[in-house]
């Protein structure tokens, strides 16, 4: 599955990450920021948090997708240049968690993105919030697939 | 035709495109590594900038619907070509390569301004509001730092000394001439005017490199890298390479103009490497210990105190200090 071309190798060594908070409780966002701190320092593996989805290879999504965020998430996803993938950080992004069947949510993030891009690649990192180690493990797993 | 082949070699291989790109990527690794150490982190491995560029080359190119596609895609290449040419001329003079003087200070200053212009035009061509904000800020910043930078570089041109009872003057705009003057009369930096001028030039180059506190044009936390916001894939790689080439050119230009260039003896080369690394680490430390200022504060800073110090340095240089 993993690509052996030089671009595939480069992609594994330099995944730039764009972080989208889809109306989560901010707990997962804090854990994502933890990954960049000296204790975990994901820049060792070439991971960089970038400000524009155009520069990113991987989208980190945290929080259940509210109806207000649905369109924005879909547009942001389509702005990622190919090859692209997403990591669902936290149980809300994976499967809605405590927000399941709530009136204000549009669905888990993978379903919302597959409405516009049926072939999108995802990795799920459950937890409330997941530990930084788990998020890094999820990212590593994802990079093994591209 | 011989000369054409020679010039192409200078431009494409050494000290031009291939050499400065590799050196620039290595120097941007130094930047990231020192940043990481300042922040008490490990930081990325030495090959990281190389992999970043290769990865970007393999990505999809997205052209926004509302963009002017031709300009949007052409400006990154214009930026890289101009930065590479500036690097070639600077290195050619610094290393005293054969083939005569290829260009003077004015040409290098113009060529070094083109990457900024290309970023401004590229941001404007992208049709993105954040790109427009980034472009306008970059435009103001260029207006701010170019004036003191040119005055500071003129300090080297206006040097005159008395060496063994004889008047020695630089009085030349050619980089090779300035290097030659410093061979005869000692580095510009070892005079009060030279110290002030290098200080001013360092601040201006800091802004040219888009480092904090003068990164208003990129400001990834507020306007998402400004003019570069819509760029993806190979064009973005070209801009990243341009930044790397500039990082490999500006410290070398400063060492050439103010600190005596490089002599091709082992000691001379080692001293040159130490000087360039010193300036680079200085850039990185300033970048990591300062917050971003507002664009109006930056302009007031450059047109006020910085230009003032540059003019004082120029007057001191005319007086032979």
Image: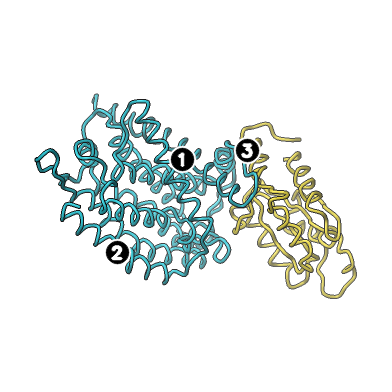
Chain colours: A yellow, B cyan
Q: Quadrant of residue B141?
A: bottom left
Numbered badge on residue B307: 2
Front: mark 2 or 1:
2
Bin the neighbour count of mark 3 within 10 Å (Cα to Cα): few under 14, some 14-19, many 20 and up: many
Front: mark 1 or 3:
1
Q: Residues at marks 3 and 2, common chain?
A: no
Q: Is residue B292 above or below residue B100?
A: below
Q: Position of residue B231 (x, y in %)?
A: 53, 54
| Residue, disc 1 | B24
Q: Residue placed at 79% from the left, 55% from the top?
A: A88
Numbered badge on residue A10: 3
Tell me the element at label 1: helix
Tell me: B64 left or right of B276. Answer: right
Q: Is residue B151 above or below residue A8?
A: below
* Chain at tag 1: B
In this orientation, which residue lies closer to the viewer: B164 or B250?
B164
Which quadrant does the C terminus of chain A fall into?
top right
* Chain at tag 3: A
Front: mark 3 or 2:
2
Q: Residue placed at 41% from the left, 59% from the top?
A: B120
Mark 3 touching mark 2, by CB under 8 A? no
Looking at this rendering, what residue extends furthest in the left direction?
A: B166
Q: Residue placed at 22% from the left, 57% from the top?
A: B314
Bin the neighbour count of mark 2 within 10 Å (Cα to Cα): few under 14, some 14-19, many 20 and up: many
Q: Position of residue B196 (x, y in %)?
A: 30, 56
Q: Is residue B32 above or below residue A69?
A: above
Q: Earlier in the sequence, mark 2 or mark 1?
A: 1
Q: Is residue B99 above or below residue B317?
A: above
Q: Position of residue B143 (x, y in %)?
A: 33, 64
Tell me the element at label 2: helix
In this orientation, which residue lies closer to the viewer: A81 or B192?
B192
């Amino acid at each position: 599955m993993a690509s052996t071309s030089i671009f595939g190798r480069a992609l594994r060594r330099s995944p730039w990450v764009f972080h989208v908070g889809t109306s989560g409780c901010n707990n997962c966002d804090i854990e994502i920021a933890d990954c960049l701190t000296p204790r975990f320092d994901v820049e060792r593996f070439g991971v960089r948090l970038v400000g524009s989805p155009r520069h990113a290879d991987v989208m980190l999504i945290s929080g259940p997708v509210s109806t207000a965020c649905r369109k924005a998430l879909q547009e942001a996803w389509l702005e990622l240049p190919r090859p692209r993938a997403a990591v669902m950080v936290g149980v809300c992004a994976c499967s809605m968690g405590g927000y399941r069947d709530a009136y204000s949510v549009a669905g888990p993030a993978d379903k919302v993105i597959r409405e516009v891009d049926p072939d999108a690649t995802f990795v799920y990192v459950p937890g409330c919030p997941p530990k930084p180690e788990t998020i890094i493990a999820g990212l590593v797993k994802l990079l093994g697939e591209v | 035709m011989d000369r054409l082949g020679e010039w192409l070699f200078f431009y494409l291989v050494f000290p031009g495109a291939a050499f400065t790109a590799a050196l620039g990527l290595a120097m941007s690794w130094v930047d990231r590594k020192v940043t990481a150490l300042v922040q008490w982190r490990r930081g990325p491995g030495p090959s990281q900038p190389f992999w970043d560029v290769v990865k970007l080359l393999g990505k999809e190119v997205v052209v926004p619907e509302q963009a002017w596609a031709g300009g949007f895609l052409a400006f990154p290449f214009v930026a890289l070509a101009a930065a590479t040419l500036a690097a070639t001329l600077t290195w050619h003079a610094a290393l005293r390569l054969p083939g005569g003087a290829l260009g003077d200070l004015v040409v290098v200053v113009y060529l070094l301004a083109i990457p900024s212009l290309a970023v401004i035009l590229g941001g404007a061509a992208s049709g993105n509001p954040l790109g427009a904000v980034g472009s306008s800020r970059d435009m103001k910043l260029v207006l701010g730092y170019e004036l003191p930078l040119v005055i500071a570089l003129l300090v080297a041109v206006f040097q005159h000394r008395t060496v063994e009872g004889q008047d020695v003057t630089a009085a030349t705009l050619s980089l090779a001439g300035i290097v030659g003057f410093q061979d005869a009369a000692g580095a510009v930096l070892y005079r009060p005017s030279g110290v002030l001028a290098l200080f001013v030039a360092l601040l201006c180059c800091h802004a040219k490199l888009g480092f904090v506190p003068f990164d208003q044009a990129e400001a990834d936390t507020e306007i998402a890298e400004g003019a570069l916001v819509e760029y993806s894939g190979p064009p973005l790689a070209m801009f990243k390479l341009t930044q790397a080439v500039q990082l490999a050119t500006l410290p070398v230009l400063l060492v050439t103009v103010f600190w005596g260039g490089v002599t091709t003896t082992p000691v001379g080369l080692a001293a040159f490497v130490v000087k360039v690394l010193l300036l680079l680490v200085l850039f990185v430390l300033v970048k990591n210990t300062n917050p971003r200022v507002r664009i109006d504060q930056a302009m007031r800073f450059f047109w006020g105190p910085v230009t003032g110090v540059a003019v004082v340095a120029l007057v001191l240089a005319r007086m032979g200090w």
